Amino acid sequence: MSQPERFEVLVLGSGTGGKLVAWHMAQSGHRTAVVERRWVGGACVNVACMPSKNEISSAKVAHLVHHAAQFGTVTSSVAVDMATVRRRKREMVERQIARHLQNYKASGAELIMGSGHFVAPKTLKVALNDGGTRVLAADKVFLNLGTHAAIPSVPGLDAARPLTHVEALELDYLPPHLVVIGGGYVGLEMAQAYRRFGSDVTIIEPGPRLMGREDIDVSQEMQRILSEEGIQVLLESELLRVRGQSGEKVDLVVGTASGEQSIDGSDILVATGRVPNTAGIGLKEAGVRLDSRGYVRVNGRLETSAPDVWAIGECAGSPQFTHISEDDFRIIRDNLAGRNRSTRGRLVSYCMFTDPPLAHVGLSEGEAERQGIIVRVARLPMNSVLGAQATERRQGFMKALIGQNDDRILGFTMIGAEAGEVMAAVQTAMLARLSYSTLTDTPFAHPTMAEGLSLLFSNMPPRSVQRTTAKVA
């Protein structure tokens, strides 16, 4: 092996947390290299968050045009050009990549395109994408490896070459009948988007409800919304075998409570979870231990079992959201500067970008029950919010959980227009440890969706009315 090139900082993977570490360390005067296999900026920029929301916005336009008459706008025939949808998405991605390359140049971090394999502690051999190899060694190493879509072991499924979200975002045609395997967040976003583009869509979910981590009322409301748009949902249904080729013609046999059922489709989208990108890259040689699921084992400071090696984002088992990977970076940055920050106890928020979207922060009713926390719950249908009435965006509801004795907000969930923006106000109040009555008495601008928070929290039962959530979540 050739003599390694020496760096102070080596980052494997250029996703959100990794690139932020690289730019920060390079700007601080440390010689820094980033090794990236394929996607400059990581999955979020190229094949996940940003491009999926771009296509979802295109689908929303298609939906609005199809229903323009109810708003008083008369249109002639409407057609969706998926090649244009894809081109719009690609142009957005290209702009994002160009911005990232500018940031690398400005920071001084070296971006190396290739596949890395550890050959010794903190020593990486890189097979360059344009040919040749380099061996890199560093004082500090940061693993930002990410995850990839899991493909269930079902007879015929792998041979059918199903779509994952990566391939689905590259389609330049409209699937006549898209069959989505999995009723989680990614599956539901893509299912609704393609239904709005004009595909027939069937969702196959093995569990008893969509979004199994959510409370029952949340799952039921989302299923009602999607069903009203013409999406067929099969719950407690196990995919048994597949015949045919995705993109042409497929036949799926599904086991249900009433027996086997055959579904004829044109395309299959698999959205059944994620697998960490930790196999086959020499982590054992690097002294980095994995947990039983293949994720990098870390402590609350995101330190691995190997000295001066950290893991960031999804590969470290952090909640699989871009904003959490960014927070991982902040924790590492501050700890390197002498502070003592941890991932433990942080307030995690997330959104699912269906229309209307789902937003959540803090505890759900189900989590409160499992943790033995007694809560008070307030619930408000979006139809009661004046902003929703004015704009005819009445679907969904808000729900808040309040502490037993101290009036702190413990959790908030919303299905409704602008849910993510409304949630941000509640999240800020939670971080400030404000009493919920602060939001009850806040004169929110009228008529906004956030105005509904005053009405929601005014419905909160008094402290004497307490309950657990065993029967509702």
Image (cartoon, helix red, strand yellow):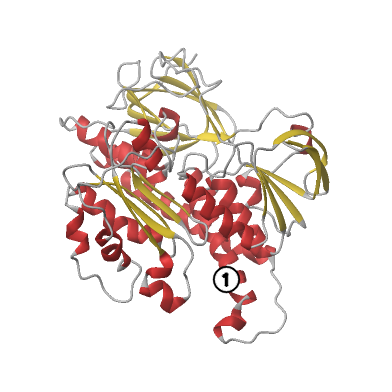
User: Residue 215: x percent and y percent?
Assistant: 45, 44
Residue sitting at x 66%, y 84%: 75
User: Residue 124: x percent and y percent?
Assistant: 45, 22
Q: Report if residue 19 is visible in the image.
A: no
- The number of numbered badges drawn on the structure is 1
Q: Secondary structure at mark 1?
A: helix
Vertical comparison of 82 with 280: above or below: below
Residue sitting at x 54%, y 26%: 133
Residue sitting at x 31%, y 56%: 424
Q: Quadrant of residue 324?
A: top left
Q: Quadrant of residue 380?
A: bottom left
Looking at this view, is 60 or 2 the one in front? 60
Near mark 1 (Cα within 10 A), the count class, few <14, some 14-19 or many ≥20, is some
Q: Report if residue 438 is visible in the image.
A: yes
User: Residue 9: x percent and y percent?
Assistant: 32, 29
Vertical comparison of 140 with 176: above or below: above
Looking at this view, is 317 or 207 the one in front? 207
Q: Amino acid at mark 1?
A: Val
Q: Quadrant of residue 255?
A: top right
Disc 1 target residue: 61
Q: Is residue 250 left or right of residue 3?
A: right
**Is the C terminus in the top left, top right, bottom left or bottom right quadrant?**
top left
Residue farthest toward the front in the current orientation of the protein: 464
User: Residue 243: x percent and y percent?
Assistant: 84, 37
Residue sitting at x 42%, y 50%: 100
Vertical comparison of 364 with 304: above or below: below
Looking at this view, is 456 or 55 the one in front? 456
Looking at this view, is 96 or 198 the one in front? 198
Q: Is residue 66 left or right of residue 377?
A: right
